[in-house]
Amino acid sequence: MKKIFVLCLLLLQILFLSSAQALAAPTVPAKPADGTFVVDEVGVLSAQTETVINTYTRALSKRTKAQIAVLTIKSLQGEAPEEYALTVLRQWGIGDRKLNNGVLILVAVDDRRSRIEVGYGLEGALTDGLAGRIQDDYMLPYFRQGNYDKGVARGYTAVLQTVLKEYGLEIKNLDVSANTRFADDRAREINMSDVAAFIVVALILFGFFFGGPGGGGGGFRRTQHGGIFYGGGFFGGGFGGGGFSGGGGFGGGSGGGGGAGRGW
């Protein structure tokens, strides 16, 4: 009888600890609606940055089936960044189901941790080392200043250019005409002309990828640290309202833990 009692206590303790860990673990946000590839739970990203990321990931997905998503959260609540990021990548299904060519950029603001999680199909192009260098050179310097918006914008641009290179493409090869149509709709709502709407879009996209105030030039060049500088600041101003209707969603991709994490 005593052995049974002790066994029951052990089982109860195991159940209690398991429940406590489950409650402590951060929940994975619901998969975004089709055409949306950014979930900013902390509210550190501008509407302009969200719009550009959604626009170019949609165009990237249409052209190559590859997808890049961004998630900001307050805290990992003790969970390892690589485990949480992989869970999100799999649950959301970032990338194509057959090609597994998805990437997740994760930022945990309160923990001061970031992670670039890479799907199976892109591990050869976006290696663990490169994923780490992108964070070191283009994200963390801004994160340390509290400028998460610019850090994410720069990091996204670097990842986008890396993925495009794997498919023999450049940013200019992507069709982002859908974003122009969205801006035209917004222009009619606020009584702007179609020409003005086009100019707004052109300035935003040019500034995002080729540098705005404090930004660098377009494309990439060698830095003093031996890395590659990717263009990608953002142009001040622009229109609000991240994203636009239409477009496909995540394709069911997966991964196995490729990528790298950083702290600051």
Image: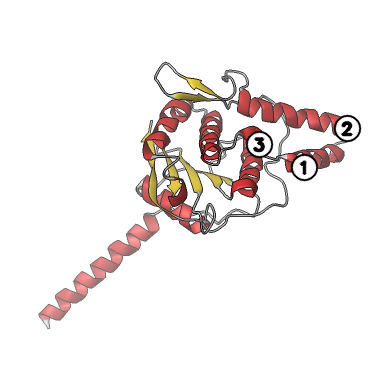
Kindly report which numbered mark, 3 or 2, lies closer to the viewer in this rendering. Answer: 3
Give the residue furthest to the top: 224
- Residue 81: image quadrant is top left
Give the residue furthest to the left: 2
Q: Can residue 239 be spotted in the picture?
A: yes
Q: Report the residue at 44% width, 26% height from top.
A: 137
Kindly report which numbered mark, 1 or 3, lies closer to the viewer in this rendering. Answer: 3
Residue holding disc 2: 193
The mark nearer the N terminus, 2 or 1, is 1
Under mark 2, the amino acid is Ser
The mark nearer the N terminus, 3 or 2, is 3
**Which is nearer the eye, 48 or 171?**
171
> x, y percentage for residue 194?
86, 34
Q: Is residue 172 left or right of residue 3?
A: right
Q: Is residue 196 left or right of residue 113?
A: right
**Which is nearer the eye, 171 or 16?**
171
Report crowding for label 2: few under 14, some 14 to 19, many 20 or more residues within 10 A (C-alpha): few
Under mark 1, the amino acid is Phe
The CA distance from mark 3 to mark 2 is 27 Å
Give the residue furthest to the bottom: 1
As drawn, the label of residue 32 is none
Report crowding for label 3: few under 14, some 14 to 19, many 20 or more residues within 10 A (C-alpha): few
Image quadrant occupied by the N terminus: bottom left
Residue holding disc 3: 173
**Which is nearer the eye, 190 or 96?**
96
> x, y percentage for residue 102?
51, 49
